[in-house]
Amino acid sequence: MDDYVLPKFFTLDRSGEGGHQAMLMGAPGEGKTTLLEYLAILAAKGKDIYGKDREKQACIWRARQHDRYLEFFKLGVGKLMLPENSNYTLLKVYEKHKEEITMDDLESLGIDYGLYTDPQSIVDQLEAGKILCILFPGSKEAETVFYSDLFESLVHRKTDEWVNVSIDESGDILAPYTAESYKVQKRFIDSIGDFRKNNIDSILGCHVHTDLDFRVRGKCKYHIYKSGATKMPGETRRLREETINHTKVSEAWITYGGFFDKFVFPDMAANAKLDYKLQTVAKTMAVQTE
């Protein structure tokens, strides 16, 4: 049987469906981050899952403190984004020790980097074929406001280039709203609702769909399942929960309406992996927001 959902998901069509919004769900340790990395690399390199050429996308990656993203630099598609007006320490983290490093050290490590002052300055530095990895050494509450501003800036950018947004552990910033966070979360909803017609693809990684605000879930028409994921309410009954939970680490299921496809993805190439991570520790945080 030929695939239906995958070709649709990887097609970049300005005059048709536009951008695609997806939730990527699964238990910890089941390869969600590896898959998210793989999809971001395909977007930056201008490839689909079948190896066919498509337009290169300008990509954004939420770089968490203990995240995997340095492989992007070994593959030549990464650019580390650091806050210009903030006082923080940048650490190189090995398995058994940490060492403080500077921007000069980043250059010697071959890590391309840029500076940002506010969300708009990140949008201004978008580049097709590059994955901007945003380090934000502030609190989760401040990061939530920052990304709501960033999403608005993306929607109102002055170009029609394709943009790919990857948010791992998206429940950190898109969790169900509270009385205090309602206004900020509403801005997220409005922006994500405009992603499709502004040529923005987004993939939101989480453990289960209830990690996210229900209004965000409603904007994601594509659902990607790894083992341990709980099916969305109303999802096709032909894809059984038991089938999802027997999925291998290198496999995933993607659904759209009543349709679904299974696909296989590779692990990160051994020569792209590094034996350290980067971590930021904030002293003061001064990224501007509107």
Image (tube, rainbow, N blue to C red):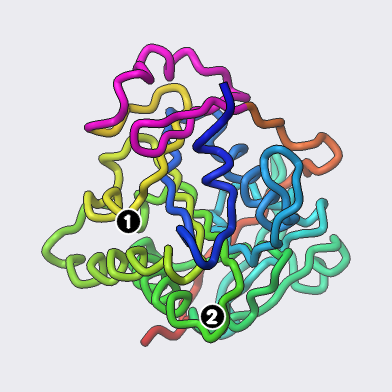
> Foreground residue, 3 or 128?
3
Magenta stretch holds residue 251: yes
Q: In this view, does 30 lie to the left or right of 176?
A: right
- The residue under label 1 is 174
User: Percent position (x, y) of residue 171?
Assistant: 35, 49
Determine the secondary structure under disc 1: helix
Residue range corresponding to the magenta coloring: 234-263
Q: Which residue is drawn at 43% across and 68% down?
A: 197
User: Percent position (x, y) of residue 3?
Assistant: 56, 30
Magenta stretch holds residue 85: no
First in residue order: circle 1 vs circle 2? 2
Q: Residue at x 54, y 66 (%)?
A: 14
Q: What residue type is labelled 1?
A: Leu
For residue 86, the mark is 2
Q: Which amino acid does label 2 sit on?
A: Ser
Determine the secondary structure under disc 2: loop
